[in-house]
Image (spheres, grey):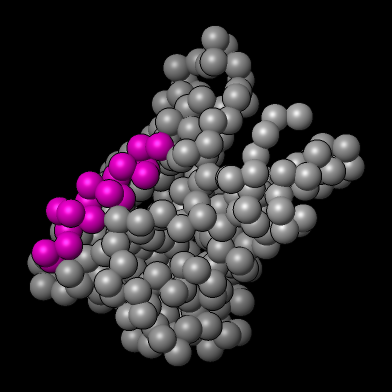
């Protein structure tokens, strides 16, 4: 129980990787703030499972693309549990379009949720930690696409590239305060968002040829690393990106 007595906010934790992270942190003893935007039933399921583990949970609806809602989310977490120790910036969106067809609204949606939301959630946590004179942990769920180009997903790649520099810059600025920040960069993970891919044998086969471990990752593969980074075992780690991709990044090539 390495997170006994800690309170963690996991954005986008109504399904997929976010849900797995919430449950893993709960299994390590943390109380969990479950954030959702459009899947209240998923948030309730996460809450149910957190409670079944024997931990405490609390659900809050917030659009991570809206700074006021991000700030309200963090404040609601603090108000409910009395404090906040760990922030996992997991919520993210993507839009598929050739660069020359990307609309301003799609660009804004992706950058606002993936980068601006994470930035201001981290800021709200840091303000709380400074006020209460405590250390803390920020963990961003980035992507292999903070380094790897992904044709037809330019705004997504820009948002994750920005998240990479956010971790590096804030590591320097927040280190003296005892606050660490790191990125976890998943590759191809088996989640609800990939249902179409999982049902396309040809595309799935081509992807697996790029993955040396010859399988998609599980949400739990990501969650275990997040739990480590949230614990005291990782107190001397900051400003780094940890890739969870089965070897995809260094083996990738277009078919």
Any part of residue 80 in sight: no
Question: Residue at position x 65%, y 39% from top?
Answer: 252
Q: Is residue 165 magenta?
A: yes
**From what the image shows, is residue 243 above or below residue 176?**
above
Tell me where residue 41 sits by quadrant: bottom right
| Chief SS of the magenta region | helix
Q: Position of residue 59 (x, y in %)?
A: 47, 65
* Total residue callouts: 0
Question: Residue at position x 72%, y 58% from top?
Answer: 213
Q: Is residue 43 left or right of residue 78?
A: right
**From what the image shows, is residue 71 above or below residue 150?**
below
Residue extending farthest to the right is: 201
Q: Which residues are magenta?
A: 161-177
Q: Position of residue 66 (x, y in %)?
A: 35, 39
Q: Nearer the viewer, residue 201 or 29?
A: 201
Q: Position of residue 120 (x, y in %)?
A: 27, 47
Q: Is residue 108 magenta?
A: no
Question: Residue at position x 63%, y 62% from top?
Answer: 219
Q: Is residue 178 left or right of residue 51?
A: left
Tell me where residue 98 sits by quadrant: top right
**From what the image shows, is residue 222 above or below residue 170?**
below
Tell me where residue 129 sits by quadrant: bottom left
The quarter in which the N terminus is drawn is bottom left
Q: Position of residue 144 (x, y in %)?
A: 53, 45
Q: Nearer the viewer, residue 128 or 145?
A: 145
Question: Residue at position x 76%, y 29% from top?
Answer: 255
């Amino acid at each position: 129980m390495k997170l006994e007595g800690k309170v963690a906010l996991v954005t986008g934790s109504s399904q997929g990787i976010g849900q797995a992270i919430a449950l893993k942190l709960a299994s390590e003893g943390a109380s969990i703030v479950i954030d959702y935007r459009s899947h209240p039933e998923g948030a309730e399921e996460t809450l149910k499972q957190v409670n079944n583990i024997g931990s405490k949970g609390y659900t809050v609806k917030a659009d991570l693309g809206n700074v006021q809602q991000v700030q309200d989310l963090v404040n609601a977490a603090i108000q409910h549990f009395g404090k906040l120790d760990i922030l996992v910036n997991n919520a993210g969106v993507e839009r598929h379009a050739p660069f020359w067809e990307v609309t301003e609204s799609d660009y804004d949606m992706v950058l606002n949720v993936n980068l601006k939301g994470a930035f201001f959630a981290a800021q709200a946590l840091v303000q709380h930690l400074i006020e209460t004179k405590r250390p803390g942990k920020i963990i961003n769920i980035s992507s292999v696409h903070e380094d790897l180009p992904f044709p037809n997903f330019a705004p997504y790649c820009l948002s994750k590239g920005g998240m990479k520099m956010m971790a590096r810059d804030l590591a320097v600025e927040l280190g003296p305060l005892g606050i660490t920040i790191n990125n976890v960069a998943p590759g191809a993970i088996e989640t609800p968002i990939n249902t179409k891919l999982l049902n396309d044998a040809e595309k799935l086969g081509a992807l697996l040829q790029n993955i040396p471990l010859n399988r998609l990752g599980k949400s739990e593969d990501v969650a275990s690393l997040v739990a480590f980074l949230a614990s005291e075992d990782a107190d001397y780690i900051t400003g780094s990106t940890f890739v969870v991709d089965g070897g995809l990044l260094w083996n990738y090539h277009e078919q």
